[in-house]
Amino acid sequence: MKKRVTKAIFPVAGLGTRFLPATKSVPKEIMTLVDRPLIQYAIDEARAAGIKEFIFVTARGKSALEDYFDRAPELEAQLRKKDKTDLLEALKATNMDSGAIAYIRQQQALGLGHAVWCARRLVGNEPFAVILPDDVIAAEKPCLQQMVEAHAETGGCMVAAMEVSPDKASAYGILDVAEDMGAMVRASGMVEKPKADEAPSNLAVIGRYILTPRVMQTLNRKETGAGGEIQLTDAIAREIEEGRDVYGYRFRGQRFDCGSKAGFLQATVAFGLSRDDLRDEFSTYLDELTAVRRAAQ
Ligand code: UTP
């Protein structure tokens, strides 16, 4: 029987240079989309997918993340005293079961593959998920849940995939497709950030993965790839080269690249408009803004 995926790694040790100066002292993953930090969206998605153990790969300057998932007794007492039940309820989402969350350090930002490898002992000999919190996905059924369900049928490695235009391919890991089964493809190769005319398809890998423990063994070799970094993509590509199955999963949902400023702004607008408590006021503001801009043109 295929093992269930119950562990997820959240690599959050990157430097977040695209958001400097903010990320000089605020971890990117703590930056807020409407009123919740990016990491909360990632944790909620993992929980919905049945994840029970949450492994954070952190670095210097990321202690705000650890505090975020801690209890806040004084704050909770104050809210209770003032009968602020709605706010107490909002805080509940930040509570983690004792022992469910583990932090491990990546001493040097040597790449995503290296960050994942840092969690090898906590993962053990089981399939595991990797979630990059700066990819935020709005979906009716959370993306990782879609993938875990598909993975229960296929086993092997699975990466979330989405179609991108040829001019964008060089920003992603791109799949070479051996067999297209609709929602899923079987990959015959994978290249990290190919040149525009060398992309093997228009299917880009984004920040959700289900991987086998064997990928950790490959990462053990600490081979560097694009940008001089230890790339997760290369370790997954090795699986294909050695004849094991790697699937791309075309998830249903909209992905926002919250690692970039433009993507973060787009996500803020989309998530703002999706909120019952904000929609009317916010959409009126946007309509007025659009009208003013049109008139000025
Ligand atoms: P990015 O490529 O977005 O890098 O990493 P970054 O450092 O976060 O941001 P920029 O490009 O400097 O603005 C993708 C994911 O991989 C993690 C990041 O935390 C992010 O979740 N990562 C990357 C690590 O944990 N360690 C690394 O060495 C590199």
Image: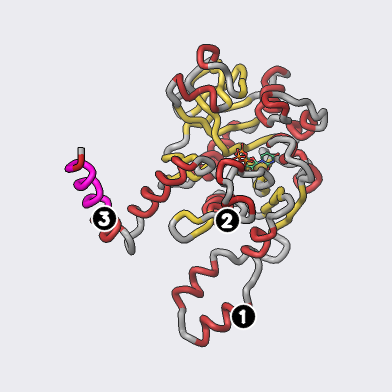
Mark sitting on residue 136: none
Q: In the rendered structure, which disc, 3 or 2, sits on the residue that comes first in sequence?
A: 2
Amino acid type at mark 3:
Tyr
Point out the residue furthest to the bottom here.
81
Residue at image position (59%, 43%) is 132
Quadrant of the image where one finds ligand 1: top right
State how far apart marks 3 and 2 are (Cα): 26 Å
61 horizontally vs 42: left or right:
right
Amino acid type at mark 2:
Ile
Residue at image position (80%, 30%) is 222
294 horizontally vs 127: left or right:
left
* Residue at which label 2 appears: 30
Residue at image position (22%, 52%) is 288
State how far apart marks 3 and 1 are (Cα): 37 Å
Residue 167 screen position, x and y as percent = 45, 21
Q: Dots 2 and 1: beta carbons under 8 Å?
A: no
Query: Of helix, strand and loop, which one carries label 2?
Result: helix
CB of mark 1 near ligand 1 (< 8 Å): no
Residues drawn in magenta: 285-295
Nearer mark to the viewer, of 3 and 2: 3
Residue at image position (25%, 49%) is 289
Amino acid type at mark 1:
Glu
* Residue at which label 1 appears: 74
Q: Dots 3 and 1: beta carbons under 8 Å?
A: no
Q: Main secondary structure of the magenta part?
A: helix
* Residue at which label 3 appears: 285
